[in-house]
Every structure is written in structure tokens, then in C-alpha cells.
Image (spheres, helix red, strand yellow):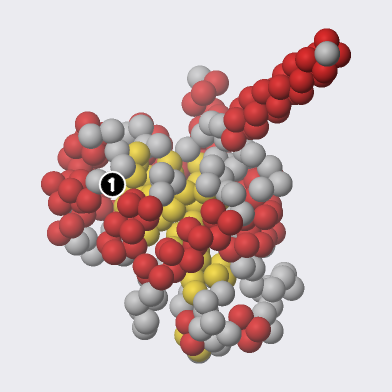
């Protein structure tokens, strides 16, 4: 009997240690604001949104690596930015057709599953999933539903964060998950809903506006920060702009130049 109790005691100690280790690993993301835009591609020569550029962002120890996710005709979740390939809309193509179009380094266009499984090999760099809004067939909410379903299936909730530019998709995700969901607003031209009094009514806790909007409305920054909103800015590629957003205490800074931004962050920490 004593031997049985001893082994039961040891069993629970092992389970407890394993659980504590797991929770520690889940929280151990790199402590910097650097989000590599479509992976680390510009200075590596890798294609944007490729497994190679994702691996490079992970190797750099960026806090996050952003990817663009779209639905194909038969609902495959693929990682690609442009809405057309060789003149054809992605949401009118099957994935079997898309994989016949290789990326510049010979890779096939990756799926979201490919990227999540690659990212799950480590615990330092998050996968920041931009759920695209097609111009030709508005399927943003459907895209969001499929993305969330896959993330849950692969048990990757602590590994990912979401970006959305569609309000219906935003409301759906906020209501369905505790995974961080940032609203993207509009490229270049602002929308009335982007103003603090409007967007905060949606219950958002995360925002990722283009840099021009923050520069045009610096008062938004202080208002959002007073409301404890997690702020990201895209796409910040010039050194002076990087410093500007660092000094404004942005939580994330999305860039095509993660190497430069990491150097600036590390230099400021030393000084």
C-alpha cells in the first residue's frame, strides 16, 4: 500500500512539473515589439509569406511574424497576400491549381496549417494571422471562422494573434475567442469607425493601424493608451519612424526591416 501511494505521489509531481514547464514555455515569447511583416524576407531574399521567411523571422527572435491568410474556392486556407495569381482571383481557384505556381525559392504556396505546424516547433515567436478581406467575394467572416477552427484543432491558441479589417469578422472573433484580435482599419484612407469613440464601442482591446493614421491623429495614441489598448503600427521601415513609434511606447511595430528594428531596440536597451 505504501509503495502504491509513493508511486501515485511521484506521478502527480511529474504531471505538475510538466504542466508548469508547459505554461512557462507558452509565456516565453521574445520580449521585443518587432513583428516581421510577411516574415523576414527583404534582407534574406526569401519570398514573402513563405515557410523560409517565417523560419528567418524565428531565427532573428522577433516577437511575431505576420502572415496573410485567404480562402480558396474549395475553402483551403492558404498563405498569400495578393488576391490574384497569374490574373486569377484566389477565391476562384482550387489549392491543387495554386500549388502548380511555385514561389521564387521553389516552395509551394503554404497553407495556414503548414505555417502553424512550423511555428509550433518553437515558443519564442508568435504567428500574427492577417485574415484577408477579398475585394471580389466578401468572405472575411467565413475566413475568420475557418481560421479559428483550424487554430483550435491544432491547439495553437497561445501561439497566434489575429488581425482583421472587416468589422463583421472582428465582432465574430471577439465573441468567440480570447485570442487577441486587432482591428486594422483602412489602408491610407481612414474610416469614421476608426476614431476612438467609435471603434472602442466594439469592445476592441487591440489595434493595428497604418502609420499614416497615427501620424495624422497623434491624439488617438494617448486616447487609446488611456483605455489600455494594445497598439501596433504598420509598415514601419525607416529608422526615424521606428524610433518615433518606440518613443510613443507602441506594443508592436510591424516592419519589412526586422533586422534594423531589432538593432535599434537592443541598442536602446543597452543605453
Left of 218 or right of it: where is 73?
Answer: right
Compared to residue 48, the image places residue 226 above or below, namely: above
Residue extending furthest toward the top: 2
Is 210 on the left or on the right of 16, as rendered?
A: left
- Residue placed under numbered mark 1 in the picture: 204
Q: Position of residue 234 (x, y in %)?
A: 40, 52
Picture layout, residue 79 above or below residue 40: below
At 23% across and 39% down in the image, what residue appears? 224
Q: Which residue lies furthest to the right in this view?
A: 3
- Residue nearest the observer in this picture, 194 or 21: 21
Name the residue: 83% across, 13% down: 1
Say which residue appears at 38% left-offset and 69% top-offset. Answer: 140
User: Would you say residue 250 is visible in this rendering?
Assistant: yes
Image quadrant assignment for residue 205: top left
Left or right: 168, with 239 as reference point: left
Q: How many marks?
A: 1
Amino acid at each position: 500500500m505504501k509503495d502504491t501511494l509513493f508511486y501515485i505521489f511521484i506521478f502527480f509531481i511529474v504531471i505538475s512539473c510538466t504542466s508548469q514547464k508547459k505554461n512557462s514555455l507558452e509565456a516565453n515569447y521574445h520580449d521585443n515589439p518587432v513583428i516581421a511583416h510577411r516574415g523576414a524576407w527583404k534582407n534574406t531574399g526569401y519570398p514573402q509569406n513563405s515557410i523560409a521567411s517565417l523560419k528567418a523571422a524565428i531565427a532573428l527572435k522577433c516577437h511575431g511574424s505576420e502572415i496573410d491568410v485567404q480562402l480558396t474556392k474549395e475553402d483551403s486556407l492558404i498563405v498569400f497576400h495578393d488576391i490574384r495569381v497569374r490574373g486569377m482571383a484566389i477565391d476562384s481557384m482550387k489549392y491543387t491549381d495554386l500549388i502548380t505556381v511555385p514561389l521564387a525559392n521553389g516552395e509551394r504556396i503554404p497553407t495556414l496549417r503548414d505555417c502553424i505546424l512550423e511555428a509550433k516547433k518553437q515558443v519564442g515567436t508568435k504567428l500574427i494571422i492577417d485574415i484577408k478581406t477579398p475585394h471580389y467575394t466578401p468572405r472575411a467572416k467565413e475566413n475568420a471562422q475557418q481560421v479559428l477552427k483550424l487554430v483550435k484543432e491544432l491547439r495553437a491558441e497561445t501561439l497566434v494573434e489575429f488581425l482583421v479589417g472587416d468589422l463583421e469578422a472582428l465582432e465574430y472573433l471577439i465573441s468567440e475567442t480570447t485570442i487577441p484580435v486587432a482591428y486594422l482599419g483602412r489602408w491610407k484612407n481612414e474610416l469614421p469607425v476608426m476614431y476612438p469613440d467609435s471603434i472602442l464601442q466594439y469592445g476592441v482591446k487591440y489595434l493595428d493601424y497604418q502609420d499614416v493614421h497615427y501620424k495624422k491623429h497623434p491624439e488617438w495614441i494617448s486616447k487609446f493608451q488611456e483605455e489600455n489598448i494594445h497598439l501596433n503600427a504598420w509598415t514601419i521601415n525607416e529608422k526615424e519612424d521606428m524610433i518615433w513609434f518606440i518613443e510613443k511606447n507602441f506594443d508592436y511595430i510591424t516592419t519589412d526591416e526586422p533586422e534594423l528594428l531589432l538593432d535599434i531596440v537592443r541598442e536602446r536597451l543597452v543605453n
